[in-house]
Image (cartoon, rainbow, N blue to C red):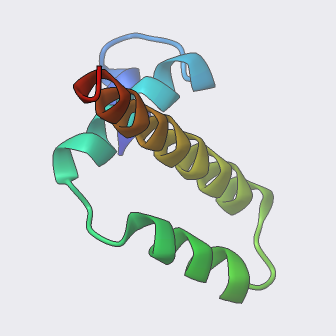
Amino acid sequence: ILFELIKKNDQTQNADEFLPLLIYTVLKTQTSSLYSNLAFIERFSFNKSSEVQYYLVSLNAASEFIKNLSREADDNDNV
């Protein structure tokens, strides 16, 4: 869906455009249990295609970015 959105806006389809949109989407959806769901998918999904692996890595990168944002916000609150 996100790549289709990029395509409609006449932008090239690459990780430079995809990852920020993915981060924004994950933040806006306020997904509960994101980290445990990712761990479950990684542990119990077998025979992953390279495309599925790409999206899992991208989602992991987005979740780590969000986790770091949360840590920075906590650090700033404690100052």
Task: Give the vertical position of 58 relative to 15 (above or below).
Answer: below
Q: Residue at x 57, y 17 (%)?
A: 16
Q: Position of residue 58 (x, y in %)?
A: 59, 44
* Residue 14 visible to the viewer: no
Q: How many marks?
A: 0
| As drawn, 56 above or below 43 | above
Residue 30 picture quarter? bottom left
Q: Nearer the viewer, residue 32 or 6?
A: 32
Classify residue 17 as left or right of residue 58. Answer: left
Q: Quadrant of residue 21?
A: top left
Relative placement, left or right, of 43 versus 10 is right
Task: Please give the name of the residue rendered at 70% of the width and 55% of the height, measured from the top-left corner.
Answer: 51
The quarter in which the C terminus is drawn is: top left
Estimate the x, y position of residue 1 in percent, counting from the top left. 35, 45
Task: Pick whichever, 2 or 8, lies toward us.
Answer: 2
Front-most of residues 48 and 44: 44
Q: Residue at x 53, y 14 (%)?
A: 12
Q: Position of residue 29 (x, y in %)?
A: 19, 52
Locate residue 20: give its quadrant.
top left
* Residue 76 in view here: yes
Q: Residue at point 49% right, 41% down? A: 62
Looking at the image, is 64 positioned above or below residue 47? above
Whole-percent x, y for residue 40 in the image:
58, 82
- Closest to the observer: 19 or 77? 77
